[in-house]
Amino acid sequence: MSIVTQTSQPYEGQRPGTSGLRKKVTVFQQPGYLENFVQALFDAVHGEGQSAQGLVLVVGGDGRFHNRAAIQTILRMAAARGYAKVLVGQGGILSTPALSAVVRRHEASGGIVLSASHNPGGPMGDFGIKYNLANGGPATEPLTEAAYQRSQQIDHYTISDAPEVPLDRLGTVTMEATQIEIIDSVADHAALMRELFDFPAIKALFASGFRLHFDAMWAVGGPYAKALLEGELGAPAGTVVHADPLEDFGGMHPDPNPAHAEELVGLMMAGNAPDMGAATDGDADRNMVLGRSFIVSPSDSLAVLAAHAHRVPGYSSGLLGVARSMPTSTAVDRVAKSLGIPAYETPTGWKFFGNLLDAGKVTLCGEESYGTGSNHVREKDGLWAILFWLNLVAVTGKSVEQLVRELWAEHGRCFYSRHDFEGLPTAKADQLMSELRAQLPSLAGREIDGQTIAWADDFAYTDPVDGSVSNSQGVRVVLADSSRLMLRLSGTGTEGATLRLYLEKHQPDVSLHGMPAQTALAPLIVLAQTLARIEHHTGMKAPTVMT
């Protein structure tokens, strides 16, 4: 074995988005593409030419195509960098929340997650890489920007010429001076779940005949769900379906929402449906929860968990506060007000919750894009959320639907929907947002389509912990009745641009809570089309995906 210095040259477009660097697999397969980015990342983290001597790194991914090959490259580069130890999930598998748990429990200096989350996999699918800090959370914007700047100057990378590491066998091997330990992918995360939830109560729930249908979508959540739900908590065999991680997710789009989890939704809407349905996404950080003929919106899910957190052992002492992303509905704000705790509104991106969690300002946090989590790790956590719901059903004796409807009865229903317009030419998407932003100073007080606008802005966030400022995080238009519409461009895709339109209307009248969400939001949809001229700019009469 020896350490080799390879000459290289920059690749354009290696700036990480809100969830790391995501591109097509074929892009990552270009000679030196991954190596360049990893070298730039290590230079940004440790300093150019500086060793990682004495430090521990965690590496794992969601099992999608190119995961194993990429891990071998990263291990060789970590050895060349001088890491003391690298912890790797068995088979190259670590869910995103599990990697965060491993980083925290083993006091590692950081971790590398290989995933494109909910994006499709396979040889022609998507791939991604992101760095997590010592707190287990995503890298800060200054660090990712430093990595990007370095990637545009790169002229070489260092790598060991050692043979491949056997990823499927537990144990330790040595590469250069680096110990590479293959660890049980599930153990640390499972231990954390035992500390938080009332496992005896959940076990008794399953013993009583309660039926759960958990769709792992042929993604990384399967092994974690099988080990805990079926292996430890007594759920019948077959409770977890599509459980084996496949490189192409079995052709599924591993995004747990009504548009892509059609099989699960169909089952839960049919006669003799299970008591509860659930799903996790490609890297198991997102979740969807359903009752019989009842879909729980992510915003309502966060609010229900906050309202009942005191019933769960890990949160029985109360919540320090809650946080939500700006486009997420205000349902959790209303719960927080009734509990007398603060509620924070952040930009989209889990990294913005990190400072609040580390500073002890919040305990629970969530996003409308099917992500919820707490201070147990520094990522959203799909299986954690599903266990939380099971714990609540077990101790309250109430169904999923009952828990949500009681939330609405007490706080009013926040009708909510997200409309995605995908695959747009970037120039057209940017033009739409530019024109919309130009209108902002003149919108307050205007009546359009019979609706009065109270105020409008381009959301800016000042971090209450470190004072950092994030501007241009999405346009907000708020009406006189507190209804909201929000528009922003997403940073999680790999082709073109995605325009996201978010709609929210609060309805305190219980007699109207059964109205279909799209009906309740129809006037807001018309207003959004008028203001943003969505069809004019995109050529699309309807969204690609509606959740």
Image (cartoon, rainbow, N blue to C red):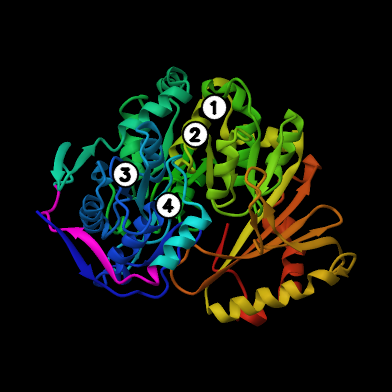
Q: In this view, does 71 lie to the left or right of 328?
A: left
Answer yes or no: is residue 540 visible.
no
* Residue 360 lies in quadrant: top right
Q: Mark 4 points at which residue?
A: 263
The local crowd at label 1, few if under 14, some if 14 to 19, many if 20 or more residues have their Cα within 10 Å, is: many
Camera-side mark, 1 or 2: 1
**Discs 3/2, front:** 3
Work out whether residue 154 or residue 359 is closer to the camera in this orientation and state it: 154
Q: How far apart are marks 1 and 2 (CA)?
A: 10 Å
Q: How many neighbours does mark 3 have within 10 angstroms: few (below 14), some (14-19), or many (20 or more)?
A: many
Q: Is residue 238 above or below residue 113?
A: above
Instruction: Residue type at mark 3: give it.
Output: Leu
Q: How far apart are marks 3 and 4 (CA)?
A: 38 Å
Residue named by callout 1? 393
- The reply, left or right, for residue 333 in relation to residue 384 is right
Horizontal side of residue 237 vs 343, given as left or right: left
Work out whether 503 lies above or below 191.
Answer: below
Q: What residue type is labelled 2?
A: Asp
Q: How far apart, in angstroms, are the residues tagged by discs 3 and 1?
A: 38 Å
> Residue under circle 3?
57
**Prevailing secondary structure class for the magenta stretch in the rendered image:** loop
- Residue 11 in percent (x, y) is at 35, 74
Please report the bounds of the magenta region as a residue range. 151-165
Identify the residue at image location x=43%, y=34%.
Answer: 212
- Cα–Cα gap, marks 4 and 2: 16 Å
- Sequence order check, earlier mark of 1 and 2: 2
